[in-house]
Amino acid sequence: MPELPEVETVRRGLSQLIIGKVVSGEVHDTEKGFPNAAHDVQQFLIGASVTEVRRRAKVLMIDLSTDYSLLIHLKMTGQLVFVGETRFGAGHPNDSLVNELPDKSTRVTLTFEDGTKLFFNDQRKFGWMRLMPTIEIPNISFMQKVGPEPLSADFTAKDFIQRLARRPKTNIKAALLDQSVVAGIGNIYADESLWGAKIHPTRLVSSLTEAEMTLLYTEVRAVMNLSVEKGGSSNSTYVNAEGKKGSYMDFARVFRREGLACPRCGATIEKLRVAGRGTHICPVCQAI
């Protein structure tokens, strides 16, 4: 599944291509891919112009001039492909990024007045696109539960520590992956941040000192900012806004480096299973 930096890369790419464009047509294959669309498409989508492309955690929002928005979650194998004066491909790196569209994976096709198109493809059909009033977005279940953005300018170390403190009996890796604590920290960035802060992922939140949690806050932001800068991790199933793999994994210090030397102390990196996920640590730097 794409993590926050990958989805942010998609947002930036779309923002350069579709803002100001007017939707002239929409086709979708099944109700699952575009639920409850039929009632509002003609009134609030067709003829609407794109005013903004936003992101909240791993969900994209395409705001429209009708005060409605398209919400998009790519899930595991979703893609967004813009075809027009240029071709933009982002998402699961199969041939649909470069081949003629629509194809058998296309769930939704949006056509703009200038003849350009935006395709939402999803091979496994876990992803979705929804059309709803913009004002109602904060009220949906996901938005009510999701934690603050880790890269937001007003998200402080104090906020981070207070939110972690709500999970005192939880190991720190599980707490970082809990989207209700902080939004968008996935497996890669949890491992990288914990290594940077020299914290073992199985330690309980209650065992961490304020200094350790402050350092972890700094590492989370540094790791995720670097990943956004590098276009995401790609993590085998993701590409960036130009249809190229993100390069963050070239800079990873511990994730998927089991058996290699820790770049800080030289010890051999190990792979464990923590919070149900493959977890990479340095047994010396991150001693319990």
Image (tube, rainbow, N blue to C red):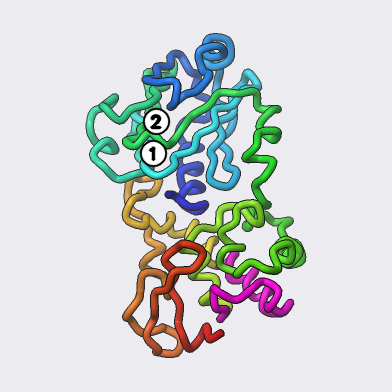
Residue 203 in magenta stretch: yes
Image coordinates for residue 105, horizontal then vertical, percent: 30, 30
Which residue is identified by label 2? Answer: 120
Q: Residue at x 40, y 24 (%)?
A: 108
Residue 146 visible in the picture: yes
Residue 63 in magenta stretch: no
Q: How far apart are marks 2 and 1 (CA)?
A: 7 Å
Residue 46 visible in the picture: no
Image coordinates for residue 116, horizontal then vertical, percent: 38, 23
Q: Which residue is drawn at 60% across and 23% down?
A: 132
Q: Which residue is drawn at 58% across and 71% down?
A: 219
Q: Which is the main secondary structure of the residues drawn in magenta?
A: helix
Q: Which mark is residue 263?
A: none
Please, which residue is most extreme toward the front here? 169
Quarter holding residue 198: bottom right
**Left or right: residue 103 compared with residue 235:** left
Where the C terminus falls, by quadrant? bottom right
**Left or right: residue 251 compared with residue 216:** left
Which residue is identified by label 1? Answer: 78
Cβ atoms under marks 2 and 1 closer than 8 Å: yes
Q: How many badges with numbers are in the image?
A: 2
Q: How crowded is mark 1: few (under 14 residues within 10 Å), some or many (20 or more)?
A: many
Quarter holding residue 150: bottom right
Q: How crowded is mark 2: few (under 14 residues within 10 Å), some or many (20 or more)?
A: many
> Dot 2 lies on which element?
strand
N-terminal of the pair, mark 2 or mark 1, is: 1
Image coordinates for residue 263, horizontal then vertical, percent: 41, 83
Stretch of the chain drawn in magenta = 198-222
Image coordinates for residue 161, horizontal then vertical, percent: 73, 67
Mark 2 belongs to which amino acid?
Answer: Phe
